[in-house]
């Protein structure tokens, strides 16, 4: 079943959007002109459009998980990053940092959007999460005292520990290394939010999920992480000093995706190709969200293009 799944991916990847598709959309073409998104109507509300984009991603994910291969738990764990997004939305609402009318992705595994919206205070949210892999290290009382930024970083840390734990045993080294790198990219963002020394201390004390499990790092710091991703330190430092954090994160994610592609193409019938495909379909969904939302606020074409992440 595993070989069948990977072979199917080689066909499915041909249906993903390419650079020219994004160019057409940026020039004003409708999403419904794309075969995979032809069910989107011009009259749909913003929420309906975003939900229909999400549904394409979830249909792709569910198809793979339903094949019942040894990769199914990993595929489900990858899908659960949509649930983490929803939890963060609710968390920001409790902190007054996100509109109460924010749109949730209609994805549910350990908790549903409806369940999240019914919770009326933050303590109940963390109590609910105690029964999930997203809250496994610190006691709720301690988490409640932290800043919103710490809480979001904590969710990310628990998530990476969780997804690494479901990698099939005989796939752990190479796939684990790539997941370590993905987690390190997220940790870089939080290093820039908190400052490097504070983040390193938090990783030692509570944010253990950011610690690489399969990559050997002599010293955990920004420079070494940039080196692992083959990103120039001087360029990265320049972007930070200019306040271009979004550009830096895009550069890091693209470097990671290129590395995943390189390894997946060398081992095209392995779990590395599965991980590559999963990243591609998630980035496609994120790109389309950015295009749709940017159109609403009237962002110029070139500005939108700078936010998109694609390889071909």
Image: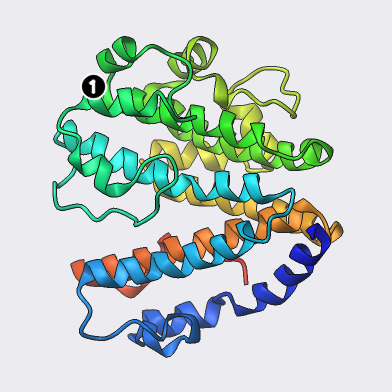
- Decide: is 254 above or below 17: above
Image coordinates of residue 138 in percent, x first then y, are 42, 13
Q: Give residue 100's position: percent from left, percent from top.
A: 13, 46
Measuring from the top left, give residue 171's x and y in whole percent: 80, 41
- Residue 188 visible to the viewer: yes
Q: Considering depth in this image, is 194 or 83 the residue closer to the camera?
A: 83
Q: Secondary structure at mark 1?
A: helix
Given residues 191 and 180, the one toward you in this image is: 180
In the figure, residue 233 lies in which quadrant? top right
Q: Quadrant of the N terminus?
A: bottom right
Front in this rendered view, residue 128 or 298: 128
Q: Is residue 200 left or right of residue 102?
A: right
Residue 268 vertical position relative to residue 75 in the rendered view, above or below: below
Which residue is depicted at the point 73% across and 37% down?
A: 177
Residue in view at x 67 percent, y 61 percent: 67
- Nearer to me, 211 or 44: 44
Question: Which residue is disc 1 drawn over?
Answer: 123
């Amino acid at each position: 079943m595993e070989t069948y799944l990977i072979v199917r991916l080689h066909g499915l990847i041909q249906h993903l959007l390419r650079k020219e598709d994004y160019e057409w959309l940026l020039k004003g073409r409708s999403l419904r002109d794309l075969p995979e998104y032809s069910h989107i109507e011009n009259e749909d509300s913003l929420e309906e459009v975003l939900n229909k984009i999400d549904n394409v991603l979830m249909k792709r994910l569910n198809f793979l998980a339903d094949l019942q291969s040894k990769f199914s738990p990993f595929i489900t764990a990858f899908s659960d990053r949509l649930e983490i997004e929803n939890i963060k939305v609710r968390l920001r609402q409790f902190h007054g940092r996100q509109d109460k009318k924010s749109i949730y992705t209609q994805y549910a595994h350990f908790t549903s959007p409806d369940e999240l919206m019914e919770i009326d205070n933050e303590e109940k949210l963390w109590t609910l999460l105690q029964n999930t892999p997203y809250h496994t290290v610190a006691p709720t009382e301690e988490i409640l005292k932290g800043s919103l930024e710490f809480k979001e970083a904590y969710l990310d840390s628990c998530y990476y520990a969780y997804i690494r734990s479901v990698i099939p045993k005989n796939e752990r080294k190479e796939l684990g290394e790539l997941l370590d790198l993905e987690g390190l990219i997220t940790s870089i963002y939080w290093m820039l939010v908190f400052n490097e020394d504070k983040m390193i201390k938090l990783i030692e004390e509570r944010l253990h999920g950011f610690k690489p499990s399969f990559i050997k790092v002599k010293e955990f710091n920004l420079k070494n992480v940039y080196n692992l991703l083959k990103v120039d330190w001087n360029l990265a430092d320049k972007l930070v000093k200019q306040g271009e954090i979004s550009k830096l994160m895009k550069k890091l994610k693209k470097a990671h995706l290129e590395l995943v592609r390189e390894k997946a193409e060398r081992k095209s019938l392995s779990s590395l190709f599965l991980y590559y495909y999963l990243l591609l379909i998630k980035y496609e969904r994120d790109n389309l969200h950015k295009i749709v939302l940017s159109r609403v606020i009237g962002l110029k074409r070139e500005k939108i293009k700078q936010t998109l992440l694609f390889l071909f």
